[in-house]
Image (tube, rainbow, N blue to C red):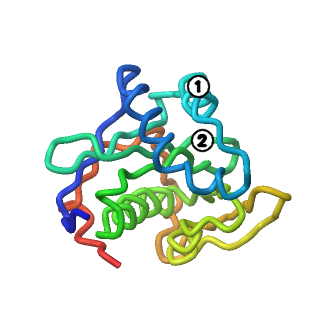
């Protein structure tokens, strides 16, 4: 495990799709296996088929690929998707720092954030620590939502930005939890 506050987000490129597909196959494996639904080829292909670099950022640690996250606008909210962090970078506060930085930006724009996790997934605790609550459940998924923080709501006349500029750990402070 790498314990560091040194991470960066950069816009994803189409060329990142294979690295993200491979990471997805590694980090998602335990939950679908637990549910009897893991198919290595399908996990990779679904990522390749739906990869949208326009709403995706690559997480880098010490200049190297360490994960990714997507924040897709959808009507009156954003969907947090494809938040994957390499196992050797988990548990040191990087995921919490990235999530916190994205949520702060959504808060400033007054945006609700939604996501879904597989039932029983331990990652749900990360989202709950950041204010997400259960909205609905399906037999397989749990859908969670986080309204904007009241302290961060935009002032009158605020204009929402369509994309996020590069974010670094230094820009948002060390968020280890």
Residue behind mark 1: 45
Q: Badge 1: few (under 14), some or many (20 or more) residues near its Cα, within 10 Å?
A: some
Measured as percent of width and height from the top left, residue 147 is found at: 63, 67
Where does the N terminus fall, quadrant-wise?
bottom left
Rendered view: 33 above or below 90: above
> Residue 18, located in which quarter of the rendered image?
top left
The residue depicted at 65 percent of the width and 43 percent of the height is: 38
Rendered view: 177 above or below 137: below
The residue depicted at 81 percent of the width and 64 percent of the height is: 136
Measured as percent of width and height from the top left, residue 60 is found at: 25, 45
Q: Badge 2: few (under 14), some or many (20 or more) residues near its Cα, within 10 Å?
A: some
Between residue 86 and residue 82, name the one nearer to us: 86
SS at badge 1 = helix
Query: Is residue 165 rendered to the left or right of residue 137?
Result: left
Measured as percent of width and height from the top left, residue 138 is found at: 84, 58
> Residue 5, located in which quarter of the rendered image?
bottom left
Query: Is residue 105 rendered to the left or right of residue 165?
Result: right
Between residue 104 and residue 18, name the one nearer to us: 18
Per the rendering, the mark at residue 73 is 2
SS at badge 2 = strand
Gap between marks 2 and 1 measured at Cα: 23 Å
């Amino acid at each position: 495990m790498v314990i560091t506050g040194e991470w960066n987000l950069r816009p994803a490129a189409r060329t990142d799709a294979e690295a993200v597909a491979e990471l997805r196959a590694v980090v998602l494996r335990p939950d679908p296996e637990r549910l009897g639904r893991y198919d290595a080829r399908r996990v990779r292909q679904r990522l390749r088929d739906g990869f949208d670099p326009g709403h995706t950022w690559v997480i880098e640690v010490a200049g190297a690929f360490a994960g990714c996250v997507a924040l897709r606008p959808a009507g009156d909210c954003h969907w947090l998707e494809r938040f994957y962090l390499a196992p050797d970078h988990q548990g040191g506060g990087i995921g919490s720092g990235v999530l916190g930085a994205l949520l702060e930006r959504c808060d400033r724009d007054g945006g609700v954030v939604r996501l879904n996790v597989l039932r029983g997934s331990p990652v749900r605790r990360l989202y709950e620590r950041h204010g997400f609550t259960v909205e609905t459940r399906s037999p397989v998924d749990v859908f969670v939502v986080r309204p904007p923080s009241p302290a961060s709501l935009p002032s009158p006349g605020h204009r929402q930005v369509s994309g996020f500029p590069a974010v670094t750990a230094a820009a948002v402070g060390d968020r280890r939890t």
